[in-house]
Image (spheres, coloured by chain):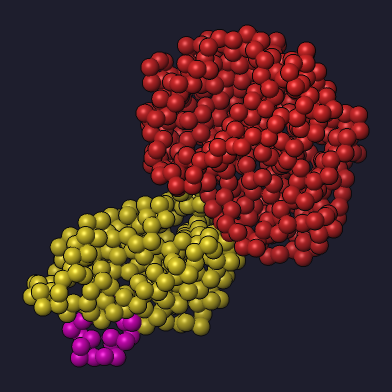
Amino acid sequence: MRSGLGGVDSVLLIGGSSEIGVAIIEAMAPRQRIVLAGRPSGELDAAAARLATLAPRVDTVDFDALDLDSHGRTLAGIFGDGDIDVVVIAAGVLGDQTVFETDPRAAIEMTRVTYTGAASAALHGAALLRRQGHGHLVILSSVAADRPRPANFVYGSAKSGLDALGRGLSQALTGTGVDVTVVRPGFVRTRMTRGLTEAPLSTDADVVAAITARAVRKRQRIAYAPAPLKYVMGVIKALPEPIFRRLPLS
Amino acid sequence: MRTSLTGWGRSTHSVADVVPVNDTGEVVELVQSAPERGILARGMGRSYGDAASNGGGIVIDTAALNDVTVDGTTVRVGAGVVLADLIDELLRRGLFVPVTPGTSQVTVAGLVATDVHGKNHHVDGSWGHHVTSIDIVDGTGALRTLTPDDADPDDFWASVAGMGLTGVITSVTFTAIEVPSAHMRVTTTPFRDLDDLMQAMREADRGARYSVAWIDSVGLTGPLGRGIMSTAEHAAAPVHGAHAAPKPRARPSIPDIVPSGVLSRLSVGAFNEMWWRVSGRPRTDAIESIGSYFHPLDGVADWNRIYGRAGMVQYQFVVPDDASEVIGIALNRLRDAHAPSFLTVLKRFGPGNRAPLSFPMPGWTLALDLPAGNPRLPATLADLDSIVLDAGGRHYLAKDAHMDADAVRRGYPRLGEWRMVRDRMDPRGVFHSDLDRRLALRAPADR
């Protein structure tokens, strides 16, 4: 159970080796239980090791975003072992836009994780939170969901779908005791973006994490990271297409 | 009906199915159905945190269990009887409840399930001292009568202060006290220094039946910790309208739109300053009605809304006499964290009772109302928790919304004993609350 001061007892991270996801758990500092759900890998084990001293119980659970049939069973098992206060949906891959345009199958492979797998986990998580009558669902979207641009619009399309799902869930779950926060980070320096050219207002995982933890505490529906992106994206979304096209954003 | 429930502090939230029951038979049926997320009884929802919530489960509304029978000083009430109504009923017969908290908007079953204390704890103990029997539906669905004099009284004492987790209390029988009037004779004495105040309170242990102190936690124009001691006795001579039920008044209400942050250090400081000046005037043997003496805040409905959306937490702890310095440390720490307390109350406790989860122990108890939105509060209270626990003290579950499992384990060394009785009374694990889950009261904390 969350405390009256916004303290969190238990967090489930879907995409258990996500650097942003792990940083979010560190920022929330759950007092009882951490569950990292992801494909078995050295990175997942490293994430568990990094969080080992944070909570009395740190578990890893096999979770494959592509194996949709397993999601319900896997998540129900995790909830069956004790309430989960916060579910963080951080499963996703970036892929390579230049490949996607010549290899549509690779593009769809990416969306199967970044949209379909994440959406499936979010819907299962939402149903389980609803049943326990309390909790918070965090969906990691992206500023790429706000307005498509040539550099990453396939990834953006997947995040855009997930973003809409999160906002819809937020409304649908009103009165159920479950809150939803959609987080839209800008360019975050992580393994996933290594080697890419940094965009303006680039940030780090711990900044996204601090903003997310605060948004959850304050029960905000949407959070940008870093915060000024809220206003930047407000302007960018409002720009007429001909002007937007001339911006050096690709 | 699925209903969003919160504690009186409005800082914790969950949704449960609220099910009104008409008789004990319906309670038994619900318990036998053993719903997956469990069952909890809720009275008036005056616990400050998550003690009366059960996210995803069933919350029993006991309001319809409202019978009252009085035989001499033996009073038997249904679980849903509200203290305000009971006091009216008793005063008409020259009787009064043995212990009352600072609000009358509570049920008697709730008073027993949290083993509530009042301003007379140093003389009369808490509710558990005065209960002669309870009827309770345990986790097997059996309706049982428990008394403190049973051959095996463990079930009774695990249910007193049991936070509703050993069963649904359906009725309570207790011994009322006889009072000569519906009024109090009140003496108030201001002290500009915390040490002087505490010394006076120690001395009042012997002389006064009721004693309590209000403390200025801000000290806008004076020292931190100045305070007003108030001691009282039941007034002997009937005065105007004595024994008449107080006339119902329209209560002003705080609207549900107060933004967080209205209670700044300045505004709380100003309130404290006003209180110091207005209430701090020395008075001797002033006559007050029982209602205005015991339940002053009941005059303003929904006063908890002044804390805005983030709500408030009440931080109440007790420390033994040999750790009295913790009171001053707590006031200083909270002032340094810019966490002004709107209402700060200091009290003496006498001996506790046999209930393993009962809060009172001999010493000092301090209660502070704090805005939950203050970002420095979590770290400050975590520090204070350690100081209180290291001093051999503990925190009050009925007020708590922030503790962790370890703090309960340390503060309540008989938790293990209580768990064993609970498991016996509720072998299928039917009774749950949000507080129960947050503090891992059932599972071993170190699993």
Q: Residue at x 36, y 28 (%)?
A: B266
Q: Residue at x 32, y 87 (%)?
A: A108
* Nearer the observer, A167 or A132: A167
Q: Is residue B108 left or right of residue B251?
A: right
Where residue B252 sits: x, y (%)?
Answer: 55, 37
Picture mark count: 0
Where residue B50 sits: x, y (%)?
Answer: 59, 48
Can residue A89 be seen here? The reply is yes
In the picture, one chain is red; tell me its letter.
B
In the rendered structure, the colour chosen for chain A is yellow
- Mostly what secondary structure, the magenta segment? helix
Can residue B444 be seen here? The reply is no
Which quadrant holds the C terminus of chain A? bottom left
Q: Is residue A39 left or right of residue B364?
A: left
Quadrant assignment, res B146: top right
Does residue B242 lie above or below B356 as drawn?
A: above
- The span shown in magenta is A92-111
Q: Is residue B354 left or right of residue B151?
A: left
Q: Residue at x 58, y 66 (%)?
A: A131
* Nearer the observer, B403 or A176: A176
